[in-house]
Amino acid sequence: MRVILQRSKQASVTVDGQVTGAIEKGYVLLVGITHSDTADDIAYAAKKIADLRIWEDEEGKMNRSILEAGGDILSISQFTLYADTRKGKRPSFVEAARPEHAEPLWEAFNEQLKAYGLHVETGIFGAMMDVALINDGPVTITVESKAK
């Protein structure tokens, strides 16, 4: 599992002209799932994201989690995070999980985040989405379950 986390001041996702998810302060999560991912990968990534201390404390140090800072999650499924660009000019997506494997894991990931007490908004799995955000910092971090 590969997640690109962007700390944001405001974010939204639109599908066919309709906003399907929007947050103020929080994280935009671009979530990629590979074919070997399991519930253990989901649990690891959700806990890591909930506990990451990348919000400033009173002294301006990154010392607070999203739970302590009071933020929300905008979760976007994104198979293109598993693009392989080593050969040719067109990326290969063979490492990205098939939708029938990826969608239930993405939904379980979102439920795990909710179980930690986070408010989660989402895009629509498999849809063409327009994602808008104001990156705060900018703070952008990659979380990979295989790195555990």
Image (cartoon, grey):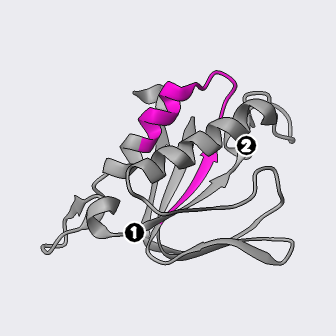
Q: Image quadrant of residue 90?
A: top right
Q: Is residue 145 visible?
A: yes
User: Mark 2 near mark 1, Cβ–Cβ under 8 Å?
Assistant: no
Relative depth, front residue between 121 and 26:
121
Relative depth, front residue between 4 and 47: 47
Q: Which residue is mark 2?
A: 79
CA gap, disc 2 and disc 1 = 25 Å
Query: Residue visible at 42% across and 34% down?
Result: 44
Which of the pair 13/100 is nearer the observer? 100
**From the viewer's perspective, is 12 left or right of 97?**
left
Q: Amino acid at mark 1?
A: Gly
Question: x, y percentage for residue 5?
Answer: 49, 55
Of badges 2 and 1, the one in the foreground is 1
Closer to the chain start, of discs 2 and 1, is 1
Crowding around mark 1 (Cα neighbors within 10 Å: few <14, some 14 to 19, many 20+) is many
Write the residue at 45% across / 43% down: 46
Looking at the rendered structure, which numbered label has been put on residue 71?
1
| Magenta segment includes 38 | yes
Identify whether 33 is placed above or below 4.
above
Q: Is residue 147 magenta?
A: no
Indicate the secondary structure of the residue bearing disc 1. Answer: loop
The answer to which image quadrant residue 18 occupies is: bottom right
Residue at image point 65% right, 56% down: 76
| Rendering coords of residue 123 (x, y %) | 70, 61
Specify few, some or many for label 2: CA neighbours under 10 Å numbering under 14, 14-19, or 20 or more.
many
Q: Assign the C terminus to one quadrant of the image.
A: top left
What residue span does the magenta drawing correspond to?
Answer: 27-46
Residue positioned 46% across, 39% down in the render: 45
> For the residue marked with disc 2, what is the amino acid?
Phe
Residue projecting furthest to the left: 59
